[in-house]
Each structure stands twice: as structure tokens, then as C-alpha cells.
Image (spheres, rainbow, N blue to C red):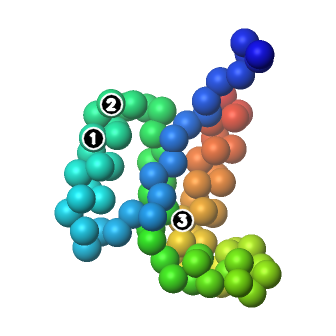
Amino acid sequence: FNPDLAILGVVLTMFDRRNNLSGQVAEDVRACLGPAVFDTIVPRNVRLSEAPSHGLPALIYDLKCPGSEAYVRLAREVMGRLSR
């Protein structure tokens, strides 16, 4: 219905560096989608999971947890793509 609609990018989330499968999936997605995949990877993070049960966005619940820091990096990356 919207011919002007486009995908800005693909975000890898819930990445667990301890799990070999996460690395393989990330490689496969990057090989298939190339530059459409954002550089930022959001890790699996307990603090991100806890935030909704406290009724807070993750960035307010714990700005310094690895997941929140990744979302801040992602926001910068999104803004960079939008300014092109």
C-alpha cells in the first residue's frame, strides 16, 4: 500500500557471545543482507528484560547496562543513516 516504504536496516538483538549459534547467525545475516545490517549488536541482557516489569524504559531503568549502551549506539547509527 505504500510504495515509498523502505527498510532502514536490520538490528541483531538478544546476541549472546557465549553461544556459538549467535555468532553463526550474525555472520549468516551479514552475508545475506550486507550493509542493511546495523553494526551495533544488542546483547542479551537481564537488565533489559527487567525494565518492563518495573514499568520503565531500559534506558531509564539502567542507562549503564550493556544492553542500554548498545541501544544508545544504535540510535546514533540510525541517526547517521537518516542524515544521508
Give the camera-side residue of 53 and 51.
53
Q: Residue furthest top?
A: 3
Task: Answer with the quarter of the image where residue 70 lies.
Answer: bottom right
Residue 69 appears at what percent x and percent y? 57, 71
Please tell me which residue is depicted at 74% across the width and 87% down the height of the picture.
Answer: 54
Q: Residue at x 45, y 39 (%)?
A: 37
The numbered dot on residue 70 is 3
Residue beneath label 2, please?
32
Left or right of residue 82, residue 23 in this image? left
Rounded to the nearest angstrom, the CA distance separating label 3 from label 1 is 21 Å
Q: Is mark 2 on a helix, strand or loop?
A: helix
Residue 45 is situated, as x and y percent measured from the top left of the image, at: 49, 77
**Which mark identifies residue 17?**
none
Q: Quadrant of residue 62?
A: bottom right
Identify the amino acid type marked 3: Ala
78 horizontally vs 2: left or right: left
The earlier-in-sequence mark between 3 and 1 is 1
- Above or below for 12 versus 65: above
51 on left or right of 43: right
Q: Do the residues labelled 2 and 3 touch (CB within 8 Å)?
A: no
Mark 2 surroundings: few (<14), some (14-19) or many (≥20) residues within 10 A = few
Task: Find disc 1 in the rendering and name its residue.
Answer: 28
